[in-house]
Image (tube, rainbow, N blue to C red):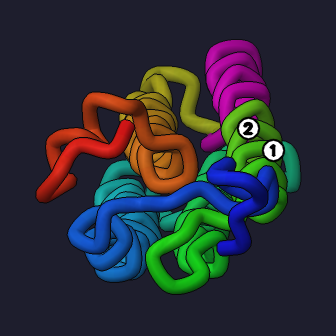
Amino acid sequence: MKQYYGQQSAEYAPLPPLFAARVRVASVVVGVALAIGTLLVFGITALVNRPLHGHSLPRGLLGLAALLLPLLSVLAIAVVVLSARRCLQGDYLVIARARSTRAALTTCFTFLSVSCLIALGVSALVDLWGNHGKLGFTELLATFANFAIGLIGYSAGLWFVRPSVSTLEKFSDHPIW
């Protein structure tokens, strides 16, 4: 916001007004869509598992953790994407907040990747449902769906807090970059 001898302060980066408005709206839309999509995947998985296995969720703690960890990771990404609005101050990007949001997104995505690998390993190595003839395909599909939803949220969140020059030029009414 302050300029010193024609140079922009290192604390803020100017954004085109159209891009800043898009970030304000899209961060809410994407964050809510991530949360709803994740809960829908969980609900559909539980609904399909009920007639298939006789109960909606695995009875063991290990199976329940393998099912819930990716879900919680995506919900964490949704919360970080929802909080991406705080990186804006007017039509300026607050650099310190954007860096902390990028770090939080990266941490959540790393946790999502690790939790998906754990979930895949648990469903491949452990008989979660007690009926040995049926593999846990619904858990595998739910894990892949949660990873895909989380990847979309991670990508969108990075686009909000670290836009490329070409994106800023596309939203700008006059090129200043």
Given the image, on which type of amino acid does mark 2 rest? Thr
Residue 106 numbered tag: 2
In this picture, is 135 found above or below 30? Answer: above
The spot of residue 18 in percent (x, y) is 22, 70
Q: Which residue is mark 1?
A: 103
User: Is 115 inside the magenta-drawn segment?
Assistant: yes
Residue ID at (31%, 62%)? 16
Residue ID at (57%, 75%)? 88
Tell me, yes or no, if residue 46 can be seen here.
no
Magenta span: chief secondary structure: helix
Residue ID at (51%, 65%)? 55
Q: Give, as a single range, the part of the protein colored magenta.
A: 112-129
| Mark 1, secondary structure of its residue | helix
Within 10 Å of disc 1 (Cα), the crowding (few <14, some 14-19, many 20+) is few
- Residue 79 falls in image quadrant: bottom right
In this picture, is 122 found above or below 95? Answer: above
- Residue 101 falls in image quadrant: bottom right
In this picture, is 107 found above or below 60? Answer: above
